[in-house]
Amino acid sequence: MFLTVSTTHRPATDLGYLLHKHPDRIQEFSEPTSTATVFYPEATAERCTAALLVEVDPIALARSRGKRSPDFALGQYVNDRPYAASSLLAVALGKIFSTARTGRCDSRQELADSAIDLEITIRAMGCRDGRKFIDRLFTPLGWQVDATPIPLDDAFPEWGDSRYFDVTLRGELRLADALNQLYVLLPVFDSAKHYWQTTAEVDKLISAGGDWLQTHPYRDTIVDRYLARTGGLDAVARARLAELDDVDATTRDDDAAPRNPTLNVRRHEAVLAEIENLRPTSVIDLGCGSGQFLSKVVRSTGIGRIAGCDVSTRELRRAADRLHVDEMTEHQSARLELFQSALTYLDPRIEGFDVAVLMEVIEHLDTARLEALEHVVFAQARPGVVLVTTPNSEYNVLYPDLVGMRHPDHRFEWTRTEFASWADRVADDHGYRTRFVGVGDADETYGSPTQMAVFTRG
């Protein structure tokens, strides 16, 4: 099995720092069933390539099979495991480049946080579903895909092509994201993982998937195939992912039809677009929860001061894990701050920001407490811009199975008129002007599922 990662970023030899593998050394890593070697076929300032070669011992692999593995007689010894890119390659990549996958690089942290030109080649990757399926999984992630089928036998062209492809991916991505995508997607193309799967596999998937899996149009297909539909783990993973968006855990996509971006994703995109247009130097997410949106602000913008606060210490711990706070350099730590705070009490730490975000927060407060939030955010903190999103209750009739409000913790949900009335009154009281934006697919009668108010001071 053979995989290469190349870059033309200048100097290209910085790839060695990002991978934590020196270009001048050949390094070997032994596993019970294989030996992996990392080396650099080329390492110049103009172009650098790191290669991962995994040599499998088929006898040792057969002997490692557990009692639960099916017995296919000769199939244990005559198979594609020694040469086809499979879960064996993904496991080797995951272990050998484990630090690179976290995005940590003390000597080149700014580069590790940046998207760079990458070219990745994967030799003999099996895919029974053909090239379209390869395109379907890689293209939404920003890759230009070149998948060349390998003939069954060059001497007999009439036999046609095999189910194996030489795949080349080109794009501008963070190296950590690219490695995590490979770690997840290589087993997706593999028809049989080489090891027994436990619930820990779900944790690996959620961790490596990060935001890119959450928003992938074929997320459910990836989950099913990564977990090989064994032991109900695919349902566990879908339930875990569903906690992060507005889609029921039983909702499934079809292999032939893309999964539409969730409302949660579209809400994030809309707020992030407003922030990018404003070009602020500082942003605070008020009620940041587990840090899902905050991680996108950190990754997608060059904003120098970013903060998140929440009343729940549990959610703040989840946010810290998502943002890998423990692995941050001193420079990164200085850019980001997480702290506990209740938005109905005065707190000087929320002052001095250009933009404040209140995403799906106000509806979780009793209406009697809204006045306190208004005073804390608009009178005391007084950011230059406040972005507030909340459900549009008029749209609820379009959810056929919805009874009551969209979330059991919502204290209220407003119509568009009610929200506009509140926002305009708050703006008049505190010296802001308002603009309203619909988020999500709009209905002619009921409007968009989410409504956003943009408060601009002055």
Image: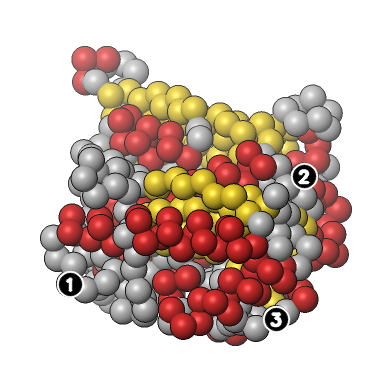
| Residue at numbered disc 2 | 111
Q: Amino acid at mark 2?
A: Leu
Label 3 element class: loop
> Few, some or many C-alpha atoms within 10 Å of disc 3 (few <14, some 14-19, many ≥20)?
some
Mark 1 to mark 2 CA distance (whole Å): 49 Å
User: Mark 1 or 2 closer to N-term?
Assistant: 2
> Few, some or many C-alpha atoms within 10 Å of disc 2 (few <14, some 14-19, many ≥20)?
some
Q: Which mark is residue 346?
A: 3
Mark 2 to mark 3 CA distance (whole Å): 39 Å
Q: Residue at x 77, y 44 (%)?
A: 111
| Residue at numbered disc 1 | 403
Q: Position of residue 124 (x, y in %)?
A: 42, 35
Q: Residue at x 74, y 60 (%)?
A: 353
Mark 1 in CB contact with mark 2 (< 8 angstroms)? no
Q: Observer-nearest residue: 108 or 440?
A: 440
Q: Position of residue 341 (x, y in %)?
A: 65, 81
Q: Residue at x 43, y 79 (%)?
A: 367
Q: Residue at x 70, y 81 (%)?
A: 346
Left or right: where does residue 253 sit relative to residue 97? left
